[in-house]
Image (tube, rainbow, N blue to C red):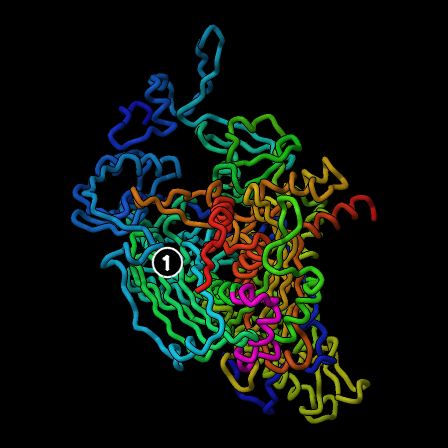
């Protein structure tokens, strides 16, 4: 599949087409480790365009898959490992429905390549349960009805956790900054504000 | 299996307040734990063994004819399992984004590559997407018949004050966070399994049967959770049919097609635009006597219908005309409270401009004319008073134009709305097992409104059991059919059917245990996990022991709506008020506070009822301030089919929100009335009025973006001109 001549008639180039055009694919088998190219005097590892083996640490467990380098972390989680808590909505870093933690920091999983998430601790909403019990944020979401259809909810729950980890007593401005990258169509923001206040109280032992 | 013999004709009504343990209280939703942990499976999350990824090639032109279609390169690509043209050479395409070819491949990247390998040539044809000027639309403007009530000409002559204004709101989209789509597998001999994101689980098979040539009885439809619908998800859609065909072509492997975000915004939902020139005539004391409106707008190719004008208030003398403009803008779909937000804005803005002209407080003007609301006038009166208190209206209100110095101007606006919301046709099967467990099954769906929880509340309260004793199963068309979730009809339908089933089941239980308690069945009641003799609680039997009398056979009872007893009625009334600040240097509008006061008859779950109101207000803030499906007149394409430029309100945009639900005997007596749509109707009007009150001029069209605000300020009178 890597040897095909790029079809430029039909318009824009795909990521894969781009790699084909750049002429580095001819010797790459379907599954391969990186090749090393010299670019501007530096050695650069080149992966793909075929599938390459990848290893991830997700919610403390090790997962392996063979994926094309163009696959996003979000698609790897959802399609390879059936971890479907993180949702695909905009698929381009606007809505926050795909939020996961990378080494404790919230990221849009749709905007991170899976290959780059290797070697980092990935936490998804599925990983927030504490010994099978709901995390205080999850409990607070339920009690304050901070969800309706629930499609944005996993992203919000993870973003709230990241916010409280960093800022245990968030001000309204902190909320806007910490959750401004998440959108809800059903309009659950009132419940979310109440939920985060309750979770913050609970975490302080109140 | 359903037993219909009633032992005793119970009265089918809702329990008195002292007999309610759960109904009307604040109950956390039963599917909350699944949803907050990511365990809840939506259609988008369904991963089936051997599943193929489906993708659709869409036409980039708003009006075109296909002159060449070559899929051969795609068919030959490794990993591609099926290629299905949905149009053929010679077909005319009427909106940008319409479906041309569907493919199924081993994974999404391969399917995307296959789409790129398809060659289509189009002959471009003239398109038209402008909806703001019926005069410019030529034969695409389709006037409907003029409607007249009373004698509008005489009434306008008699009027002491007449105001005229232009108001309106553009096309917007649904932007459900879960895109439209399905996972379909053709299992063996014409058995089709469909996982689909739908508001109508029981209605999908019937719609797929014809196009697929398979009996509806062979089509199994399932959905556990849905990530938003708002009126846009009642059909399998052409892509759902395509997924089924692709699956058949690929030897039955499951095919998943979920729309990309751009397609979701382009083709999977639009609320029609409506604009109108409105004249209102009144007496000097504010009594409104005459209405005249000419409206126009577009819903794509099918002509739009007239609006319910004037909204809520039956002004005695009226003349109304409507012009539907046919455009190449993609199909409209029902959008939460179809036609109402538009009718509401046109009416409430015109009345607000009348009040400004009369130098009256618009709240007083509404109260003066509230008799025109008919049957529900006293409810509105009560609600307006409560809302005014919660908003501190009398303290904060000032005449139009905030006189305070500085660039930030503050203002208040008010609006009222209505919605029918009677329960739909619905059936459910309630089963009591010999171990005492209880299960309710129906082919309904929970849009996030809390349907599952409401059903559990009704059944548990009726049987005198705790909430977790009842298991509710929905989202499968093998369960008894329930209506689609549209028009705020679900809560009335499912709660009434569930109540009837539970009452009938209880009668049968009473008949079985009455001899044990030495009582007649009609002397028994179910309370706190026991069946007992009314007035003599010492003679009782635990629910589990009573169920052991079923002799090992589960008891199943069918409940229906409609049915005996009036458990659901129509006609919800609501009031909303907005407090905004407008920066007249930047044109930015901020919501300080909104108040919603809402009636919906008997409330089953106060917690989720309030959530509907908060959610409606927030969705309303979103379309009032941000949302517009912008169509490029040159290409006919949507310019903002993404969530960066099709902006939804975020947490920072909504201000302080206050909800007050009307409760008490007077409301309970009317039974259950739907609540999904009402709270989304008034925000556009209330916010538009508040902005006019703040800056002294009307901004005629939503969304109230900075450019529109600055434009209205520059013109000084906006569209509101004295006649
Ligand atoms: S899906 Fe990743 S931000 Fe929207
Ligand atoms: S709960 Fe539906 S999108 Fe947030």
x then y, percent, for residue B165: 44, 61
Q: In the rendered structure, does residue B373 fall within the stretch colored magenta?
A: yes
Q: Please tell me which residue lies in front, A96 or B495.
A: A96
- What residue is at 75 percent from the left and 81 percent from the top? B541
- Residue under numbered circle 1: B332
- What residue is at 41 percent from the left and 52 percent from the top? B181
**Placement of the N terminus of chain A among the 4 image quadrants:** top left
**Residue B283 falls left or right of residue A165:** left
Depicted B598 relative to depicted B523: above or below: above
**Residue B190 falls left or right of residue A199:** left
Q: Quadrant of residue B23?
A: bottom right
x then y, percent, for residue B118: 25, 37
Q: Please tell me which residue lies in front, B692 or B429.
A: B692
- What residue is at 24 percent from the left and 30 percent from the top? A9
Residue B474 shows in the view: no
Magenta region, main secondary structure: helix
Q: Please tell me which residue lies in front, B29 or B578.
A: B578
How many numbered circles does the render carry?
1
Depicted B470 relative to depicted B222: above or below: below
Q: In the rendered structure, does residue B585 fall within the stretch colored magenta?
A: no
x then y, percent, for residue B364: 61, 71
Mark 1 crowdedness (10 Å alpha carbons): few <14, some 14-19, many ≥20: many
Residue A206 shows in the view: yes
Q: Residue furthest top?
A: A41
What secondary structure is marked by label 1? Answer: loop
**Mark 1 near ligand 2 (CB under 8 Å)?**
no
Q: Which residues are magenta?
A: B354-380
Tell which subunit mark 1 falls on: B
Q: Quadrant of residue B567?
A: bottom right
x then y, percent, for residue B310: 45, 72
Q: Please tell me which residue lies in front, B376 or B102.
A: B376
């Amino acid at each position: 599949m890597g040897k095909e001549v790029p079809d430029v008639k039909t318009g824009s180039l795909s990521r894969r087409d781009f790699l084909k055009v750049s002429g580095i694919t001819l010797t790459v088998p379907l599954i391969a480790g990186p090749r090393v190219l010299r670019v501007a005097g530096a050695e650069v590892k080149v992966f793909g365009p075929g599938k390459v083996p990848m290893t991830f640490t997700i919610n403390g467990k090790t997962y392996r898959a063979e994926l094309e380098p163009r696959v996003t972390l979000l698609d790897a989680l959802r399609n390879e490992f059936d971890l479907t808590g993180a949702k695909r909505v905009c698929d381009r870093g606007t809505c926050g429905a795909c939020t996961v933690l990378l080494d404790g920091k919230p990221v849009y999983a749709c905007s991170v390549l899976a290959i780059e998430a290797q070697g980092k601790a990935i936490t998804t909403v599925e990983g927030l349960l504490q010994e099978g019990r709901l995390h205080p944020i999850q409990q607070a979401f339920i009690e304050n009805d901070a969800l309706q259809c629930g499609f944005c909810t996993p992203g919000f729950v993870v973003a709230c956790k990241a916010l409280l980890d960093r800022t245990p007593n968030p001000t309204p401005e902190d909320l806007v900054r910490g959750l401004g990258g998440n959108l809800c169509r059903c309009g659950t923001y009132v419940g979310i504000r109440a939920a985060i206040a309750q979770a913050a109280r609970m975490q302080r032992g109140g | 299996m359903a037993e219909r013999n009633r032992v005793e004709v119970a009265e089918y009504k809702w329990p008195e307040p002292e007999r309610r343990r759960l109904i009307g209280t604040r109950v956390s939703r039963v599917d909350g734990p699944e949803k907050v942990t990511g365990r809840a499976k939506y259609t988008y999350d369904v991963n089936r063994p051997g599943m193929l990824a489906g993708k659709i090639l869409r036409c980039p032109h708003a009006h075109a004819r296909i002159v060449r279609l070559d899929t051969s390169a795609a068919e030959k690509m490794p990993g591609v399992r099926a290629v299905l043209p949905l149009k053929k050479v010679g077909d005319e395409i009427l909106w940008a984004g319409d479906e041309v070819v569907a493919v199924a491949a081993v994974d999404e990247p391969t399917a995307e590559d296959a789409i790129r390998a398809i060659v289509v040539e189009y002959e471009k044809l003239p398109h038209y997407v402008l909806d703001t000027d019926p005069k410019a639309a030529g034969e695409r403007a389709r006037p409907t018949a003029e409607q007249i009530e009373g004698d509008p000409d005489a009434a306008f002559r008699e009027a002491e004050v007449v105001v005229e204004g232009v108001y309106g709101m553009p096309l917007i989209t649904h932007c459900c966070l879960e895109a439209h789509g399905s996972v379909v597998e053709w299992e063996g001999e014409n058995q089709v399994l469909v996982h689909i994101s739908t508001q109508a689980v029981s209605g999908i098979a019937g719609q797929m049967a014809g196009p697929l040539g398979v009996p509806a009885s062979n089509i199994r439809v399932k959905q556990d959770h849905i990530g938003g619908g708002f009126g846009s998800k009642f059909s399998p859609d052409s892509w759902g049919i395509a997924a089924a065909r692709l699956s058949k072509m690929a030897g039955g492997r499951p095919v998943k097609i979920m729309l990309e975000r751009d397609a979701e915004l382009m083709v999977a939902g639009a609320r029609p635009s409506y604009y109108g020139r409105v004249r209102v005539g009144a007496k000097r004391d504010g009594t409104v006597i005459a209405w005249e409106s000419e409206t126009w707008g577009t819903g794509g190719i099918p002509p739009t219908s007239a609006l319910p004008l004037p909204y809520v208030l039956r002004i005695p003398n009226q003349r109304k005309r409507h012009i539907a403009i046919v455009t190449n803008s993609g199909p409209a779909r029902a959008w939460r409270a179809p036609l109402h937000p538009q009718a509401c804005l046109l009416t409430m803005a015109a009345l607000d401009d009348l009040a400004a002209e009369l130098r009256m407080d618009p709240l007083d003007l509404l109260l003066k004319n509230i008799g025109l609301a008919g049957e529900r006038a006293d409810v509105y009166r009560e609600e307006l008073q409560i809302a005014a208190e919660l908003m501190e209206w009398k303290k904060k209100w000032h005449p139009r134009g905030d006189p305070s110095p500085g660039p930030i101007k503050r203002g208040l606006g008010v609006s009222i709305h209505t919605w029918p919301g009677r329960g739909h046709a619905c059936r459910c099967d309630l089963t009591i097992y010999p171990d005492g467990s209880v299960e309710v099954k129906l082919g309904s769906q929970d849009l996030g409104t809390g349907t599952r929880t409401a059903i559990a509340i009704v059944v548990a309260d009726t049987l005198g059991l705790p909430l977790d004793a009842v298991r509710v199963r929905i989202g499968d068309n093998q369960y008894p059919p329930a209506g689609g979730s549209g028009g705020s009809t679900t809560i009335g339908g499912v709660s009434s059917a569930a109540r009837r089933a539970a009452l009938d089941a209880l009668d049968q239980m009473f008949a079985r245990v009455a001899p044990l308690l030495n009582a007649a069945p009609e002397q028994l009641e179910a309370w706190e996990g026991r069946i007992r003799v009314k007035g003599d609680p010492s003679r009782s039997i635990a629910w589990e022991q009573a169920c052991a009398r079923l002799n090992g056979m589960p008891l199943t009872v069918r409940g229906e709506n409609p049915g005996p007893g009036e458990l659901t009625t129509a006609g919800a009334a609501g009031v909303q008020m907005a407090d905004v600040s407008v920066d007249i240097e930047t044109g930015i509008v901020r919501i300080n506070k909104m108040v919603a006061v809402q009636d919906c008859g008997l409330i089953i779950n106060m917690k989720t009822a309030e959530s509907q109101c908060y959610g409606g207000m927030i969705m309303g803030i979103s379309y009032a301030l941000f949302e517009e499906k912008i169509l490029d007149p040159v290409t006919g394409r949507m310019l903002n089919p993404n969530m960066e430029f099709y902006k939804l309100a975020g947490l920072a945009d909504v201000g302080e929100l206050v909800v007050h639900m009307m409760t008490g005997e007077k409301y309970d007596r009317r039974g259950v009335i739907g609540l999904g749509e009402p709270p989304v109707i008034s925000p556009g009007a209330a916010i538009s009025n508040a902005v006019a009150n703040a800056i002294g001029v009307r901004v005629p069209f939503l969304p109230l973006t900075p450019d529109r605000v600055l434009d209205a300020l520059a013109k000084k009178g906006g569209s509101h001109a004295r006649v």
